Image: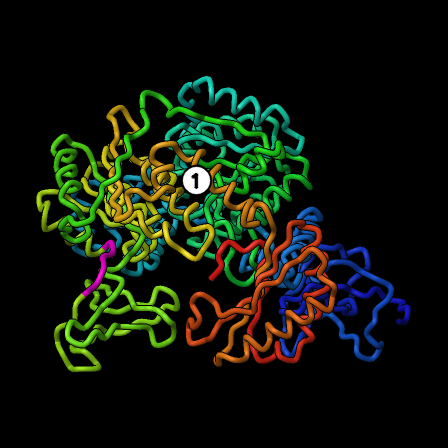
Amino acid sequence: MRKRTSPVLQVAVPAPLRRHFDYLAPPNVSEQQLTPGVRIKVPFGGRTHVGVLLATSDDSSVPAGRLKRAMALLDTTPVLPDDMLQLMTWASTYYQHPVGEVLQHALPVLLRQGRSASAPTVTVWRLAAGSTLDPDTMAQLHQRAPRQAALLESLQQAPDGLNAAQFSDLQWDWRAAMARLVDKGQVEAHTRSCLSEPGAAAAQPGPPLNDHQQAAVAAATGHLGEFEVCLLDGVTGSGKTEVYLNIIEQVIAQDRQALVLVPEIGLTPQLVARFRKRLASPPAVLHSGLTDQERLCAWLAARDGEASVVIGTRSAVFTPLARPGVFIVDEEHDVSFKQQEGFRYSARDLAIVRARRTGIPVVLGSATPSLESLHNAARARYRHLILPERAGAARPPALHVLDVRHRPMAGGISAPLLEAMQRHLTQAGQVLLFLNRRGYAPTLICHDCGWVGSCHSCVTHMTFHQGERRLRCHHCGAERKVDVQCPDCGSPDLRSLGVGTEQIEQSVREQLPDFVIVRIDRDSTRRKGAMDRLLTQVHEGHGQILVGTQMIAKGHHFPNVTLVGVLDADQGLYSADFRASERMAQLILQVAGRAGRAERPGEVLIQTHHPDHPLLQALINDGYHAFAEALLAEREETSFPPCSHLALLRAEAPGREAPLVFLEAARESAEALAADGVSLFGPLTAPMERRAGRYRAQLLLQSDQRAALHRLLARWAPALEALKSGRRVRWSLDVDPMEMF
């Protein structure tokens, strides 16, 4: 190692290698400009990459003649503040993922591409002062230039102006027509901050809090400026969002910022609308449904302190804040907070780590808290705040089990459930039917020979989608047209087996033709804005029957829903995944909580073939907390999380043998490192052995002590990279895995 006269840059490059790379400084760049957190354009592997500067050094292990020079410095000030740089470096170590890829995950796409880190502006068009739009003028314009007339009519209804996003549904070139209107002086174009919205209404006061809500707010805000984890454990409809809002109002009053994480995009629009009504400053929004420009705007507004509140999905946990005051994780139990590919992090857990490092409180909210959070609350690591009652006059719904054994079923719906639906609908109530299985049917089968429509790339059946006459694999995304006849015997008698939301919708329409049905699942909400439109239809009462998957099971407020039908409660009762029963209970209670949220009482009917199952009975009769205590006792006996700590090494390859060979070598490597206090299980084939054309296997590591597991992982990960058998497979290390398949 030789000392150099010019500084050596330690750069995190987005590459699947667990280390940084050394470069010489770009030409004409002073040492004072080289601050950790700035972006550096560097040559790497014959291509150009945008990396992040971690540190500078006087030394390098790279020989003088091989040390490359960076190409350009992209920032005058760090895009990633020091606290975020340290958090991401910690996350790279904890989750055993390459630091370059971790840091790239924290940056918006446009910053990864090297674009400027300056906040974009939004163009707003509005009618020019003195524009003449009398009926005769508009009639003539409709004949000569109908597109211009349509734009003028839209602007007439919006005195504060409209931006490009509000014209996005138009199926023609509206920009050319708008340019002509600007040229003629009828319309004026203005620019504004990409965060603010024209005509934002003044903040509205919220409803008075009940005693339990007031106590929760007081407890959560009693230590602003100090680290504390509060578990806000409130039954569905107990007003957790009002507690969040009151906490945030106090944080904003101290000129600090709040970060709110939600598990899914579907929960974001209604939460944003509610926050906009209550808070004086508009929230910045971050989720995958935004354009790259919109994400960059929100990210920079948060980093620079312009946004007082940031609302986002999982990756928003990496958003830098100028003045952080509180972190809130809504529906903290949701598995969506765990990234399942690439950089496999938990947003909930990182929010807690970030809050501890920043010295601020974090609030975890749920009606069905995860066993991990309940375990920590029981050991006084978290402050347990309980909201035992629904807010206002609403009362908890009555839960009943429907034994469907020996009963005729019409499209997945039993006669007692259909009768209850008719009763509630005639009383002007809305009905929600929940089935966590989209498509028409999970299987297409030949009635003559038993052939099953299977995925050619996965060990699974393809789902039949009747509306599009397609078979789709919900695991790898493969699809094909429905076979006209059986490929094996030639019979045309192909039948669907099982039910999905598409079939439920058809069945209900046939049995209750006088009512409007709204189906909400991934298929019906693919287009941008579709989710908002469907939810608006339900809220305005234009849809009396709501059919959907877990997208509608949590967080949504449907005040007119008085009956919830859970069509299949059996999926989580018998599963190889030790977390299946916990998730089954959470899902049932979350969707049940959509009923009876206003003055009218709610009813929940749960269809099952196993009405006497002890877990189901404990959930119905004793409630979620008794159910969770029983599960925690089981976890302690079996040494599963939260009573132990896991890591899962996965491997996949085109052939069956290579993953097992690699994992066997990996096991030998771990054993050679003297893995005291860590048990190894496997290698074994994955529960779904073949997926997307690749064979999969895994090796499980388990330890009662987190420190012992991570001591081994720190030494083991570099050894795995050196294994020759690893070159024949694609492998990944999942720390604290939430999915075992």
Left or right: residue 187 compared with residue 330 = left
The one of 691 and 343 positioned closer to us in this rendering? 691
Identify the colour scheme used. rainbow
Q: Where 608 falls versus 47 (above or below)?
A: above
Figure disc tally? 1
Q: Secondary structure at mark 1?
A: loop
x, y (%) of residue 13?
66, 66
Q: Is residue 261 visible?
A: yes
Q: Quadrant of the N terminus?
A: bottom right
Front residue of 646 and 382: 646
Q: Could you classify mark 1 by the number of other residues whose Cα lies within 10 Å: few (under 14), some (14-19), or many (20 or more)?
A: some
At which x and y percent is residue 161?
Answer: 37, 42
Q: Is residue 656 above or below residue 4?
A: below
Q: Nearer the viewer, residue 619 or 459?
A: 619
Q: What residue appears at the point 26 percent right and 69 percent down from the top-left corner?
A: 471
- Give the amino acid at mark 1: Glu
* Residue 660: quarter of image: bottom right
Left or right of 57: which side holds 698?
A: left
Q: Is residue 115 visible?
A: no
Nearest the camera: 80 or 439?
439
**Vertical order, 166 against 721 (above or below):** above
Q: Give the percent coordinates (x, y) of residue 700.
A: 57, 62
| Residue 685 percent coordinates (x, y) | 49, 70
Q: Which range is magenta?
A: 496-501
Asked if the magenta segment contains residue 683, the reply would be: no
The residue depicted at 59 percent of the width and 43 percent of the height is 351
Q: Quadrant of residue 466?
A: bottom left
Location of mark 1 (residue): 197
Picture residue at 70% right of the left edge, 54% below the top: 708
- Which residue is drawn at the image coordinates 62% and 31% (left, top)? 380
